[in-house]
Image (spheres, grey):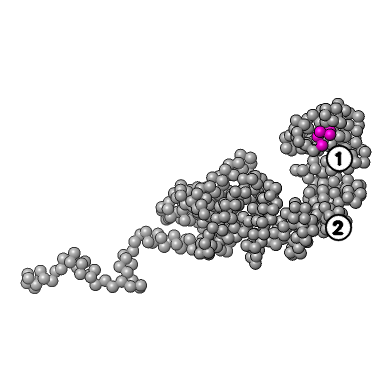
Amino acid sequence: MNASQSKSSVVPFQSQQKDQSLRIAEDEFLSLKDLVPVHHDAAARQLARISAEIGELTRENRWADALALFHPVEEKLPEIATDEMRVRIREKNAFALGQIKRFDEAMAELKKCLAVEPDNFFHHSSLAYTAYNSLYAARNREIFLSGNIRKERIETAHRHFKAAQALRPDGVTNFYREGMLWKQIEDKVEKALPLFHKAVSNWEACTEDERERRHQERKNYVKSLYQLAGSLLETGKAMKSLDALKKCMTADEGTDLVSLVHKYFALGKIHYQLNRNAEARDALLFALQCQAGPAPDYVCELLGRTYLSMEAPEKALEVLGKVPEKHRRAYFLWTIADAQCALKNFEAARKTLAWATERDTRAKHKSLLRLAKIEYVHGRFEAALEHAKSADAFFRKTWGNACADALFWQAAASLHLGQKDAARGLAEELRTHAPFYPKLERLLTATGQG
């Protein structure tokens, strides 16, 4: 081979690269990048595989198996090197931890996710929901949260609900859930009302396409309407409550996201508050028909109370008798006792209320006050005074302040026992504690202070 031949047969590398690139034919089966493996592609494929595996375990509710394989991520998956990639596993681990009520660990994982992605809507929403769920578990006595820890947990839930709402101000779920936090956990219905209103108005402002895309939030729209109705009723707005409930029943027709029992119980409760006893009775009877199992105590109690308002104590006792004795809570026993008093069966009422005092640890004073009034109406003023004193002592020990009703009945009984100075002191304390108490002026006059 001569020099000229050798020169012409050797093609420079750059020229070869250029010539080859001109002849590349990419299609759906092969592309140039597939010829050269890239490390981050391999990591992404691994992450996708792990995510799919966790997803499969989640669908089968195999939370413990998922955690055994992938939690903690640093230990179980050391090859997942970057924080950004670990986040995808952490958020799934946090969900699994929450499902088995390991709330502290779940929240710790989500806080690590937020450290990497501080503006991630899903992390804020999940952290708020996990804190909220832990508070529900504590309320149901599934876990224990002490005073300071509970307070901090409530603050955490509010903070991250607010962050999620700011990131998605047109959402439904996080407004609904924070409303439930105020209403069910903190017992502050006035604070819950604007959040339920916001959840409802946000959904109703959506177009049909938006509703289709966000269909998973529809259930919380329906629940928001239901909770809005209940909150309006609690704050004395019965007619507005009725409007909200009717809208809920229309929106929930055919889906029963809120059970028929709950909806018709709520309808009965509203009618009862509006003194529409016949309508309340009919709604509550329908609620009982909708219940597949044993009659719910709360429906029977309100139906019994409705029959009492209709001056039908026999019917009240009949419906109250459908609930087995072991399921009769204190408030239920009060209604039984009231029906027994309406039938002038006072000895039975005494026994019922004595039983209620044994079963009740939070509102025992209400049973004692009913007993005080039964004894008072029978002229047994010493017994009435003792029951009223016991009610006041229980209330002060439990709630930290005087019980207005107990002060009144102590004073009234003391007057009949000729203890006018004691009655005067009790009446004065009542005036200081509850200046607008019914019949206070009459009591003050009777004690010489009018």
Cα separation, mark 2 vs mark 1, equals: 26 Å
Position in image of residue 23 (x %, y %): 24, 72
Q: Label 1 sits on what residue type?
A: Ala
In what quadrant of the picture does the N terminus appear?
bottom left
Is the residue 127 above or below the residue 396 in the image? below
90 relative to 323 in the view: left or right: left
Is the residue 326 above or below the residue 56 in the image? above
Dot 1 corresponds to which residue? 372
Crowding at dot 2, Cα within 10 Å, few <14 / some 14-19 / many 20+, comes out as some
Q: Secondary structure at mark 2?
A: helix
Dot 2 corresponds to which residue? 315
Residues in magenta, as a range: 439-443
Q: Residue at x 84, y 55 (%)?
A: 310
Q: Label 2 sits on what residue type?
A: Lys
Queried whether the magenta region covers residue 440, the answer comes back as yes
Q: Residue at x 72, y 57 (%)?
A: 267
Asked where in the image residue 365 lies, by quadrant, the reply is top right
Q: Residue at x 76, y 63 (%)?
A: 286
